[in-house]
Image: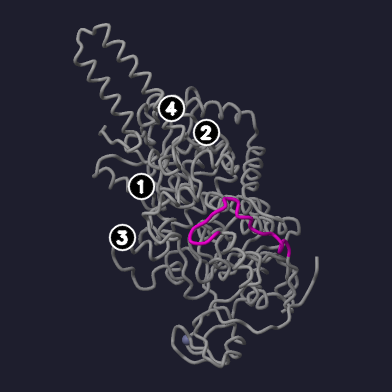
Amino acid sequence: MNQYVLDFEKPIRELEARIAELREHSKPADAFTAKEIKKLEAQVVRLRAQIYAKLTRWQRVQLARHPNRPYTLDYIERMIADFIELHGDRFFGDDPAIVAGIGRLEQQPVVVIGHQKARETKEKLRRNFGMPHPEGYRKALRLMKLAARFKRPVICLIDTPGAYPGIGAEERGQAEAIARNLFEMAHLPTPIIVAVIGEGASGGALGIGVGDRILMMENTWYSVITPEGCAAILYRDAANAPQAAEAMRVTPDDLLKMGIIDKIIKEPPGGAHAHPDAAAQLLKQALLQELASLRRISATQLVKQRIEKFNRMGVYLE
Amino acid sequence: MEWYKRTNKGLEPSEKKELPDGLWIKCEDCGEILYKKELDRNAKVCLKCGHHFRMSAEEYIRLLADDGRFDEFNAELRSTDPLKFKDSKKYSDRLKEAMERTGLNEAVRTGCCSVNGMPVVLAVMDFSFIGGSMGSVVGEKICRAVDRALQTSSPLIIISASGGARMQEAALSLMQMAKTAARLALLSDAGIPYISLLTDPTTGGTTASFSMLGDLNLAEPGALIGFAGPRVIKQTIGQDLPEGFQRAEFLLQHGFLDAIVPRTELKKQLSQMLHFFINRKRKD
Ligand SMILES: [Zn+2]
């Protein structure tokens, strides 16, 4: 993994570098250096808590996009046993921007679906930066229906800057593919748990985002459009993205207050990008917990509650 | 509930191509100078080239509802600016201004009416209200229209004209896509038909939710229909878009529309389609 450091993380990284340096230069360690290291480590914890307690919405967006953050396959590798990826929509092709497959969450067989980003240039292009085409949504739906037929729960991991705006995508019905997923997911007779693990932008995110429980990891964002897209349209310049992120209220706390999500999943101190293993454990625990509570509800009741859940979303004056 | 008949107040042109004396209007497509009254009589379809001028919700209601009778419901629902959103202008001011300019409370009107004797629930969007964008109110009114169709076992017709989700309501507007689609799943499960008519333009979150979910998806000739807007696509791919891209004819060719229906034929064809779904004696 590369050494990508966000501006506001720099003071923490500097302290960590000093600790590493002290360790390196005091072998064998003397009592004085050991004490100094302990002091610095305590300082790191305090500083990190301080910085993370006061993140702006834009900083949260930057964290959600951190290239060291675990992506769908990174989580699958850490949470799902015996995972087998399944491909293709049976109509046109296989979209690498969405991965889907079967595996086990502890003892429970599940279908897992998620947007997939990448870190290296070539792979980024292959994954189309996590921006799906219609065949991605149709593959997702095909496997959700498979899950429903065999009474297996569905887990959807959201991490996309949006559905791809291109000629082929429009020719093959991007809008229809997303609309169809919303419609079918609404009455799919099996539990669906959705977790935003990075970026959640627009219908491209929602296209695999209708579920019984909607969770967001702590350093993620979710909204109707990217802050850059909003800024370009409403503020005449994409450079105003930080302002747009504030105005749209894109953080997990905001969405919890809006009544859109059910729960925020805490990340390890320093964020999922610093501790992917611990982050995956926290996500897994949250999924298991939700699954346990959903398992007791009949499929008919589940669908009824799911449609009601979305019907409550929105604020208006009568 | 109040049955009423709208007085035939002067129709407003959808574009500013009106000539000074207000009696004549230039076709934005072929350039023909048209007598406004004649254009209105032809459902705002150019008599020379067939270009469909944009219409308001009021005009569609008058076109389709028998005797212009429309029992509107939930007309009082309003947006509240829940996020206290502000860009160059406050969202609350934008709303106020749109209400004053259009005389509407929101970007969709919903109600019951008859189409050639067939009772239906009709929802019509109006592009002149903040670009027909979908916020909490549009989502709620669409859902309540679905509920009315469920309660009365009447077919549902939605006429879309929308730039997509309303950014000023951010995630709340995004969720209206799921909310309306979910409600339509209930309608579908109950075996009640839904006909969607997409008019110029229908893009973004509206297309990617209820507009594309009709048992029949219809469109007006030449209507721009898509997920991403053409400008965004052009910017992303860095090349010009093919001729006719994202027009109704393009969508029909690619298999996403059941039919393109000229507005002058709309009421007749809708009524024929409704009779396929519902057993009822014809009155036309
Ligand atoms: Zn003309």
Identity, as a three-letter code, of the amino acid under mark 4: Ala
The residue pinned by badge 4 equals A49
Marker disc for residue A264:
2
Question: Where's residue A260, x and y in %?
Answer: 57, 43
Please, what is the dominant secondary structure of the magenta stretch?
A: loop
The residue pinned by badge 1 equals A94
In the rendered view, does A85 fall on the left or right side of A149? Answer: left
Q: Secondary structure at mark 2?
A: strand
Of the two numbered discs 3 and 4 in the rendering, the one whose residue sits closer to the viewer: 4
Marker disc for residue B237:
3
Decide if ligand 1 comes within 8 Å of the CB at mark 2. Answer: no
Q: Is residue A9 above or below residue B92?
A: above
Please state the chain letter of the residue tagged with numbered disc 4 in the rendered image.
A
Residue A82 visible in the snapshot? no
Of the two numbered discs 2 and 3 in the rendering, the one whose residue sits closer to the viewer: 2
3D distance between C-alphas at marks 2 and 3: 36 Å
Identity, as a three-letter code, of the amino acid under mark 3: Ile
Of the two numbered discs 3 and 1 in the rendering, the one whose residue sits closer to the viewer: 3
